[in-house]
Amino acid sequence: MLSQAGGNSAGSPVVAYDPVARVVSLSNPTAQGDGGAACWLQPNQFYQVNFAIPNSPQANGLRAIDGATLDPAGAKPIGFNSGPMPCSGSPPAPPRVHFCVDIWSPIFSARCSAPQCHGAPTQVNPQSYPQFPDGFSRPAASLVLATTQGVGETAIGRVAQGSNTGPLAKAGAPGFHFGVDMPIIDQGDSTTGNPGNSWLMYKLLLAPPPDASVPNSPITCGSGMETPAPSFGNIHPGVPMSDAERARLSNFIVGREMPFPSLPGAGDPVPPTKTADNPTLSIDELERVQTWIANGAPLEDCTQCAGVDAGSDAPPGDGGSGDAPPDAPQDAPRAG
């Protein structure tokens, strides 16, 4: 709860969680869609953030992913002074993310869309890829990331198979149990999504980010989508996730990390670097995905992008290294 110096409530701020940097942000609840904002915090006033400690399994409050609560003795309020700021004004504009050039082309298409991974069903050579009796491949976990249509119909708002351990076969609202009935992508109200409640983010976070990145191939899409967004790596500077934290996360996010390693039996590179055989996402790329979801996971028609076709269920020509299903054989073939 956010309160004034006298203890009176200062309203209910918008709470947003960045699972990449593991940072919680409080923002103006009166911000308008046109960028304007009504009065919220007053200038030169003292405020403090108080933490609710749940006293029962059903009570609301701050919890870790395993349900553990803060030690009441250490849950001290965080105080701050608002400074000599104006009462109203426009909040900082969020970074602009284009689905085609920032998300689909360098990540979903290039590294997740091989036939044995999350490509659309396609007729394949049985000597190269697994196929069904009809001669076609099937996307792992019924998730298609190879096309805009596939993302919209199989990822957004759809419960992840690995998380669907609740009583109903559908995505549930964020609750007391982390990772239960979590949607693959939580689009929210189509303008403000919830990356902290999106299974996709945690599957990507299971893979250690590379120490160095190889630049992605440029792509031209037109209509204001000519260039990727600026660097996202310093939006919320934070301490990188440790191996121990990643191991704890894996207790709740079942299956292998994504993108699936091209050589799963060879072990992880040390230190990890972004290469063709290690297609994990950099911090900058993880922040792009996080920001895209936070903006409501808007989709775009990528058929106008030079050299690619993401508007139908036809798979891309290469497919990248992809991410095989968790039970893929250790010598799963690479695409491309």
Image: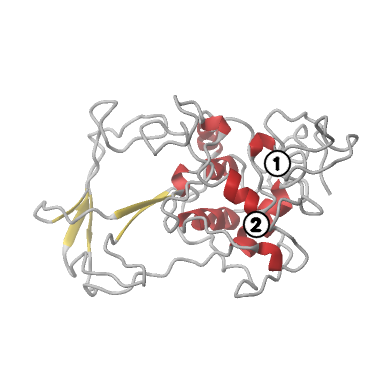
Position of residue 209 measured from the top left corner of the image (x, y, whole percent): 62, 48
* Up-down relation of residue 292 to residue 36 (above or below): above
Position of residue 246 measured from the top left corner of the image (x, y, whole percent): 54, 37
Q: Amino acid at mark 2?
A: Trp
| SS category of the residue bearing label 2 | helix
| SS category of the residue bearing label 1 | loop
Q: Residue furthest front?
A: 134
Query: What residue sits 21% from the left and 65% below the top?
Result: 40
2 or 1: tag closer to the N-terminus: 2
Characterize the local packing of mark 2: few (<14), some (14-19) or many (20 or more) Cα atoms within 10 angstroms: many
Task: Identify the residue under disc 1.
Answer: 323
Mark on residue 199? none
Dots 2, 1 in contact, CB < 8 A? no
Residue 226 occupies quadrant: bottom right
Q: Left or right: 199 with respect to 90?
A: right
Q: Amino acid at mark 1?
A: Asp
- Label 2, label 1: how many angstroms apart (C-alpha)? 15 Å
Task: Identify the residue under disc 2.
Answer: 104
Position of residue 42 measured from the top left corner of the image (x, y, whole percent): 18, 67
Residue 196 makes an appearance in the image: yes
The residue closer to the viewer here, 56 or 100, is 100
Query: What residue sits 71% from the left and 67% below the top?
Result: 305
Give the tally of numbered discs.
2
Q: Left or right: 37 with respect to 250?
A: left
Query: What residue sits 24% from the left and 42% below the top?
Result: 51
Q: Nearer the viewer, mark 2 or mark 1?
A: 2
The residue closer to the viewer here, 64 or 227, is 227
Residue 237 makes an appearance in the image: no
Position of residue 319 measured from the top left corner of the image (x, y, whole percent): 77, 50
The residue closer to the viewer here, 265 or 244, is 265
